[in-house]
């Protein structure tokens, strides 16, 4: 019975650590066990702000996005990381077939 309680508790704790790694939560983020996850050994400080940002995607298979202050999947960082990102009046528009548009400020890793 103790083993089952321990395993259940360990699962809950590991899920919380994985969620922090994916969301890029500041201060002491731990890496995930996923090959596409974020692995950080050190402290992370993320300060990000966006103002009047717009992302519009029209058509078939289009992507438009605004990103400020993120550590994306597949990233491995050793040491302390500080991101101070700001965007103001950013616009990303994708129209037509197979187009992409994006504004990324203070982003590490990913596509």
Image (cartoon, helix red, strand yellow):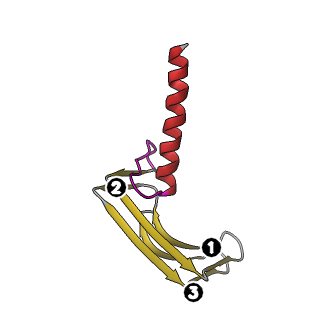
Q: CA distance from mark 1 to mark 3?
A: 25 Å
Task: Classify mark 1: helix, strand or loop.
Answer: loop
Question: Of helix, strand and loop, which mostly describes the magenta segment?
Answer: loop
Q: Is residue 27 magenta?
A: yes
Residue 71 or residue 17, whichever sits in front: 17
Q: CA distance from mark 1 to mark 2?
A: 38 Å
10 Å neighbourhood of mark 2: few (<14), some, or many (≥20)?
some
Give the magenta-colored segment's residue range. Answer: 24-36
10 Å neighbourhood of mark 1: few (<14), some, or many (≥20)?
few
Q: Is residue 106 magenta?
A: no
Q: Which residue is tagged 1? A: 98
Task: Classify mark 3: helix, strand or loop.
Answer: loop
Looking at the rendering, in which quadrant would you find the N terminus?
A: top right
Q: Which residue is tagged 2? A: 43
Which of the 4 quarters of the picture holds residue 5?
top right
Q: Which residue is tagged 3? A: 89
Q: Position of residue 96 (x, y in %)?
A: 67, 80
């Amino acid at each position: 019975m103790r083993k089952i309680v321990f395993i259940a508790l360990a699962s809950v704790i590991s899920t919380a650590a994985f969620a922090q790694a994916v969301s890029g939560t500041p201060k002491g983020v731990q890496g995930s066990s996923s090959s596409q996850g974020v692995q950080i050994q050190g402290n992370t400080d993320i300060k990000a702000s966006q103002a009047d940002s717009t992302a519009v995607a029209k058509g078939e298979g289009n992507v438009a996005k605004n990103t400020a202050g993120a550590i994306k999947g597949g990233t491995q960082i050793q040491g302390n990381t500080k991101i101070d990102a700001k965007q103001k009046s950013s616009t990303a528009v994708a129209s037509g077939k197979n187009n992409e548009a994006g504004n990324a400020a203070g982003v590490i890793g990913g596509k």
